[in-house]
Image (cartoon, rainbow, N blue to C red):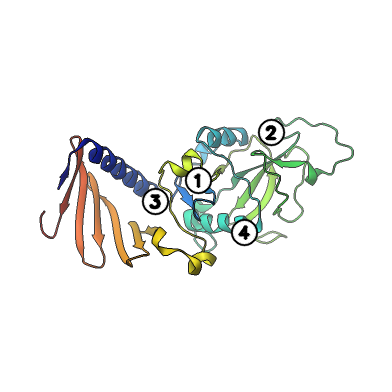
Amino acid sequence: VVFGTPAAGILLVFFFLSLTFSMMSFFSDWSGQTVCVGGPERPCYKIAYFHDVSSRVAFREAVQACEMDGGALLSIESPGEQRDIEHLLSGAVGGPGSGGGISDGDFWIGLTRVDGADQTETSHAFTSCPQMYYWTDGSPAPFRNWYFDEPSCGGEACVVMYHQPTAIPGLGGAYLYQWNDDRCNMKHNFICKYEPGTVSQSGGRGCLGIPPLEEMEALTVFQWTWCGLFRPGVVCLDLVWSVWTWCGLFGPGVVCLDLVWSVWTWCGLFGPGVVCLDLVWSV
């Protein structure tokens, strides 16, 4: 079937390209993939994880990258949001027991000290060091999740979330998900956050409508399709009709399998439109 009308062609090309780039992001362990963990009233997140250590960035660069993408460097405003981020990281780049140093690498979050990223020391005689930290996106949230004996302050004024699953645990336990202050010129991965209604959340950048697990039973199912990584592709469940579909990259296009009816379909760009071939009926 060839969809060649201007409107249909543009929409389907956009869908095809979005699906293709989303699939490619999944194949690289979700790195750079915008992920939504709730409905439209909840934030979305983008995990910027660099396998190549030399590509990691300093704190100010991470702030600028998120702002240029329409978001902000991650603020974590509650224990629930902390758990959401831990869940995303454990699925994206490997958690405890995943094995291999390739999954190690801390993440900048948007917490810094008032004399922070410039690394200049000023006198705050009546303010304790932990009280001097603030969220760069302006959030007033007081939630903190410091590792044991942190923050150490001194010349360390920008904050990372630990992600070192292969490291030997310290006095505060595993170096996973708790926070540590670090020098702002150190190079790390980072996480961006997109508030509800922002361009990056609503603009179709591969957002996954995955509700928090504790909300699944209360889900209004006619509004939802769930998608998750199922190597070497992505599997989606239509929560209305209980129809499973698997899609993966195949040659210059994308191939999808309806897991209920065992129907294979391949789609690829064709001139100003998109051509799809039903591989069972050759239609």
Task: State whether residue 32 is above or below residue 174.
Answer: above
First of labels 3, 2 by sequence position: 3
Residue nearer the viewer, 195 or 151: 195
Residue mark closest to the camera, 1 vs 4:
4
- Please tell me how crowded label 4 is: few (under 14), some (14-19), or many (20+) other residues with Cα within 10 Å: few
First of labels 4, 3 by sequence position: 3
The residue that mark 2 highlights is: 117
Q: What secondary structure is marked by label 3?
A: helix
Disc sitting over residue 26 in the figure: 3
Disc sitting over residue 80 in the figure: 4
State left or right for residue 65 relative to residue 144.
Answer: left
Residue mark closest to the camera, 4 vs 3:
4
Q: Looking at numbered disc 3 in the image, what kind of residue is underneath it?
A: Phe
Residue mark closest to the camera, 1 vs 2:
1
First of labels 2, 4 by sequence position: 4
Separation of marks 3 and 2 at Cα, in angstroms: 33 Å
Residue 24 visible in image: yes
The residue that mark 1 highlights is: 46
Residue mark closest to the camera, 2 vs 4:
4
State left or right for residue 264 relative to residue 203.
Answer: left
State left or right for residue 64 relative to residue 283.
Answer: right
First of labels 1, 3 by sequence position: 3
Answer with the quarter of the image where residue 17 lies: top left
First of labels 1, 4 by sequence position: 1
Task: State whether residue 181 is above or below residue 70.
Answer: below
- Please tell me how crowded label 3 is: few (under 14), some (14-19), or many (20+) other residues with Cα within 10 Å: many
Residue 224 visible in image: no
